[in-house]
């Protein structure tokens, strides 16, 4: 009898199915449309304004950076740090053309995330996906582009780049200028990640970016499992917490077969902060750090980023070379004094030019030294020049 | 039915002598009056006499079976859809209604679970449009968005971070000022 009931329960919905004569393709389109319609009020345009540095005799001009944002609470908007870094005023514009000023609650240039608060708005929030996206997952990318017009594309997660404590999704979605901070939704309409950008051509240091945008088709998103620790930090501590190792390093290279080919081999210790984790571990000037938590270190920037995202209190394992002998050790990280690490380049020229903002992932050549800055000095960051 | 047709139907029974007295008298009078039927009956009778005079032979035991099988193969299969359609409609209607009822009662306890309610709510939920809330703060100073969109000067930049792929890693490209040698830089963390 039970078997009969079960079979009947299974058959009953099937009996109704042929009534909806619909092709698979139009069913997919309808599903995408339904998800997009639900998510559209949660996707916003973010405008970050600042005055350009005053030159003697020149009129003061306002520079605008336009990106996208995603409502994650009734007045909390998630966007990328690259959009709002250095801004004096931040505005959010909704799909139904409401515009209010927002303030930056917290910013993490290492993970390339920022949380805004728009007190004058009541927003519908997007649910967060409860499992990280993996290769093959379908993705609907939504954002805002020129004239705050909505953009949308369907693609899949191509692959996941894993690094200690952080990761990045490579998508097959098309993304458009202004999409940084936009939503990457899964097939259930949940936030799978935050659109970061698209594949750019590797350019020589100091060279200006090309004016024309190349055809895309390969984009990147910061996955939800990187976003959640950032939101948790803000909820629990009201600030972004980064790890501190207490060391100064420079890049180390060996020459390849071609003399112009310089192969990075790790981070060479220049100085150790007394009493810091590096000093407790016994590191000295001249040591070459080659691995962090089982991952090979090529550039000092990688190590700096992994230390930052590991967070204060995290136990890390390190491998370094001294006098051609391999050394290993484990230690706990301290807390960095500022949410914006001193090693991130945030000078006025670069913070307002696309691509030079803080990326979520590593810069592959070292930058020059920057003074340490407190997180509340964002507006001053804008006026800092570094050349 | 005319009389000739009626008469020809009786030929077989008349030959076998399986007709009633009235039928016999009626047929014999008709055959006497109708030359067409008479000729037909003579042909019929001659055929049966010829067949009956043929020598009898023994056939294979499975002949009948094989013949029937061949006959079945030769005839086209009956249209089963037509057969189904021929059934009274009320059986289908009642059966479907019963199936739905039983299926629904089986689903009912499951329909009450929060997960399902959430899915159903998510499907049908109409997402509220963003709206302004009255706060004590001053009215926000409007930015002319139209001018932002149309006026693509260097003062308006639409952000899309570039990412480069290098040595199996995805990285934001570095943009050092001219003259700065990467390996000379020292970073602290």
Image (tube, coloured by chain):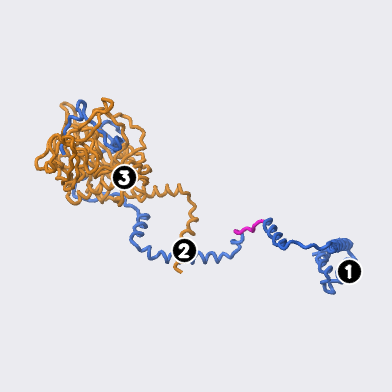
Chain colours: A orange, B blue
Question: Which residue in the structure is indicated by mark 1?
Answer: B29
Q: Are marks 3 and 2 on the same chain?
A: yes
User: Which residue: 26% across, 36% down?
Assistant: B172
Q: CA distance from mark 1 to mark 2?
A: 71 Å
Residue A92 located left or right of residue A156: left
Mark 2 element type? helix
User: Which residue: 38% across, 43% down?
Assistant: A155
Mark 3 vs mark 2: in front: 2
The front one of A97 and A34 is A34
User: Residue A2's spot in the image, x, y percent?
Assistant: 44, 68
> Which quarter of the figure is the C terminus of chain A placed in?
top left
Q: Which region shows up in magenta?
A: B76-81
Question: Which residue in the structure is indicated by mark 2?
Answer: A7
Please tell me whether residue A266 is drawn above or below residue A103 in the rendered image.
above
| Magenta stretch secondary structure, dominant | loop
Q: Chain of mark 1?
A: B
Q: Is residue A88 visible?
A: no
Question: Which residue in the structure is indicated by mark 3?
Answer: A183
Please tell me whether residue A25 is drawn above or below residue B36 in the rendered image.
above
Reading the chain from its start, which is encountered first: label 3 or label 2? 2
Q: Any magenta on residue A109? A: no
Please tell me whether residue B109 is drawn above or below residue A57 in the rendered image.
below
Q: Check if mark 3's residue and mark 2's residue have beta carbons within 8 Å.
A: no
The outermost residue toward the bottom is B21
Neighbourhood count class around disc 1 (C-alpha, 10 Å): few under 14, some 14–19, many 20 upward: few
């Amino acid at each position: 009898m039970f078997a009969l009931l079960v079979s009947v329960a299974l058959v009953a919905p099937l009996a109704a199915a042929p009534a909806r004569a619909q092709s698979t393709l139009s069913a997919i389109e309808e599903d995408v449309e339904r998800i997009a319609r639900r998510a559209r009020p949660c996707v916003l345009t973010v405008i970050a304004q600042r005055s350009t540095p005053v030159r003697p005799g020149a009129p003061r001009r306002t520079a605008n950076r336009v990106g996208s944002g995603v409502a994650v609470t009734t007045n909390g908007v998630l966007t990328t740090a690259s959009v709002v870094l250095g801004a004096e005023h931040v505005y959010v514009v909704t799909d139904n053309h409401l515009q209010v000023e927002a303030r930056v609650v917290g910013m993490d240039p290492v993970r390339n995330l920022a949380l805004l608060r728009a007190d004058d708005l009541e927003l519908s929030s997007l649910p967060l996906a409860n499992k990280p996206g993996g290769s093959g997952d379908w993705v609907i990318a939504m954002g805002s582009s020129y004239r705050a017009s909505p953009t949308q594309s369907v693609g899949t997660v191509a692959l996941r780049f894993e690094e200690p404590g952080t990761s990045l999704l490579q998508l097959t979605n098309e993304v458009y200028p202004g999409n940084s901070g936009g939503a990457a939704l899964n097939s259930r309409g949940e936030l799978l990640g935050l659109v970061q950008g698209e594949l750019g051509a590797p350019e020589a240091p100091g060279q200006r970016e090309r004016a024309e945008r190349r055809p895309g088709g390969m984009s990147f998103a910061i996955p939800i499992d990187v976003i959640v620790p950032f939101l948790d930090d803000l909820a629990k501590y009201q600030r972004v917490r980064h790890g501190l190792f207490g060391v100064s390093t420079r890049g180390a290279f060996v020459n390849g077969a071609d003399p112009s080919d310089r192969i990075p081999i790790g981070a060479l210790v220049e100085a150790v902060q007394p009493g810091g984790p590096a000093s407790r571990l016994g590191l000295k000037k001249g040591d070459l750090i080659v691995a962090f938590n089982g991952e090979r270190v090529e550039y000092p920037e990688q190590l700096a980023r992994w230390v930052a995202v590991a967070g204060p209190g995290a136990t890390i394992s390190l491998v370094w070379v001294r006098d051609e002998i391999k050394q290993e050790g484990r230690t706990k990280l301290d807390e960095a004094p500022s949410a914006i690490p001193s090693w991130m380049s945030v000078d006025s020229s670069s913070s307002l030019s696309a691509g030079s903002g803080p990326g979520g992932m590593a810069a592959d050549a070292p930058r020059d030294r920057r003074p340490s800055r407190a997180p509340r000095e964002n507006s001053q960051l804008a006026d800092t020049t570094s050349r | 039915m005319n009389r000739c047709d009626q008469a020809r139907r009786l030929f077989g029974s008349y030959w076998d002598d399986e007709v009633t007295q009235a039928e016999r008298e009626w047929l014999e009078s008709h055959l006497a009056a109708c030359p067409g039927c008479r000729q037909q009956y003579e042909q019929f009778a001659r055929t049966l006499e010829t067949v009956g005079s043929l020598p009898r032979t023994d056939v294979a035991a499975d002949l009948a079976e094989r013949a029937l099988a061949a006959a079945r193969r030769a005839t086209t299969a009956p249209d089963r859809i037509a057969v189904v359609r021929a059934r009274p409609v009320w059986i289908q209607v009642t059966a479907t209604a019963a199936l739905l009822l039983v299926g629904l009662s089986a689903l009912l306890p499951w329909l009450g679970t929060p997960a399902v309610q959430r899915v159903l709510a998510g499907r049908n939920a109409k997402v509220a449009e963003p709206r302004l809330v009255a706060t004590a703060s001053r009215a926000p100073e409007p930015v002319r968005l139209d001018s932002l969109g149309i006026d693509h000067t260097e003062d308006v930049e639409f952000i899309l971070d570039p990412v480069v792929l290098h040595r199996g890693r995805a990285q934001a490209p570095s943009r050092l000022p001219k003259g700065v040698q990467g390996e000379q830089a020292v970073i602290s963390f």
